[in-house]
Image (spheres, grey):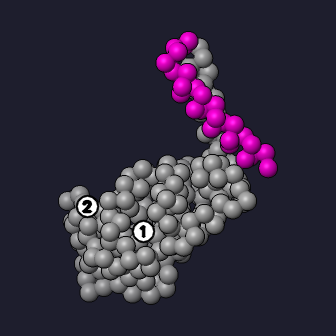
């Protein structure tokens, strides 16, 4: 992967960046995504945010090597603290767990003007993001699921709007867990992901039953409920 050829997941993320956007890529690592977005004429300006010194220096070096210092500002800081209010029109947060992305959004929500597009690519735990978006008034406008190098990733795109709209006429519990748009489409990667989850949960349930540990029964009930939700959704 480099600034001219992104990984499959980041290339798909880039397709959701609005043309001419001021992009903020949080947790930018080598700044590949902002460099690509500028070079391809997708974004007009960009900010690469990094909290860790090593990746921050890698981003600085990459932007310099690409000759994009005038268009990309590399800033060191935690999450959205690298931004001023309303500074970015598109914000990408990629390659982290859903709970961490949710925390970054929540801790930095005072930086939003309400006109941004959020493009979020969690490795796991996308349901935490969907729940946060709904609670905070963000409407999920698109989702994508893809597989790359044996790993499955999801992309969630949101803007301020009607947070409950994507969940109309659906089982909200299932849609928050599995994704309202993904649930409607149910492509092969989606089915693979959830069948793998079912296999994993059933294995844990059997282990709990075999242990006879009463303190684990609450975990069994929780997993049994998830199995029921997913099985019903996949039968559609």
Quadrant of res 76: bottom left
Q: Relative to residue 177, is residue 23 drawn left or right?
A: left
Query: In the rendered structure, which segment of residues is drawn in magenta?
Result: 211-236
Does 5 sit above or below residue 39? above
Q: Which mark is residue 78?
A: 2
Marks 2 and 1 sit apart, C-alpha to C-alpha, by: 14 Å
**Helix, strand or loop: magenta stretch:** helix
Q: Of callouts 2 and 1, which one flags the residue occurring earlier in the amino acid sequence?
A: 2
Nearer the observer, 66 or 46: 46
Q: Position of residue 11 (x, y in %)?
A: 51, 70
Q: Position of residue 146 (x, y in %)?
A: 59, 58
The answer to whether any part of residue 61 appears in the image is no
Crowd around label 1: few <14 · some 14–19 · many ≥20 (10 Å)? many
Q: Relative to residue 216, is residue 106 drawn left or right?
A: left
Q: Residue at x 32, y 71 (%)?
A: 111
Which residue in the structure is indicated by mark 1?
Answer: 92
């Amino acid at each position: 992967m480099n600034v001219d050829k992104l990984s499959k997941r980041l290339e798909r993320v880039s397709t959701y960046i609005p043309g001419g956007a001021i992009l903020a890529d949080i947790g930018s690592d080598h700044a590949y995504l902002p460099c690509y977005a500028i070079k391809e004429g997708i974004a007009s300006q960009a900010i690469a945010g990094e909290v860790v010194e090593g990746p921050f220096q890698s981003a600085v070096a990459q932007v310099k090597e690409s000759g994009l210092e005038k268009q990309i500002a590399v800033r060191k800081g935690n999450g959205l603290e690298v931004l001023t209010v309303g500074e970015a029109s598109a914000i990408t947060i990629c390659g982290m767990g859903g709970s961490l992305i949710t925390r970054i959004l929540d801790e930095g929500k005072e930086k939003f003007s309400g006109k941004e597009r959020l493009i979020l690519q969690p490795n796991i735990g996308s349901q935490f993001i969907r729940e946060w978006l709904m609670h905070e008034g963000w409407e999920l406008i698109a989702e994508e699921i893809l597989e790359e190098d044996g790993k499955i990733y999801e992309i969630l795109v949101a803007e301020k709007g009607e947070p409950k709209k994507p969940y109309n006429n659906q089982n909200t519990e299932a849609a928050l867990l599995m994704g309202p748009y993904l649930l409607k489409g149910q492509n092969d990667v989606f089915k693979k992901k959830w069948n793998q989850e079912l296999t994993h949960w059933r294995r844990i349930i059997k282990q709990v039953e075999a242990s006879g540990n009463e303190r684990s029964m609450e975990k069994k009930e929780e997993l049994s409920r998830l199995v029921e939700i997913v099985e019903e959704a996949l039968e559609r």
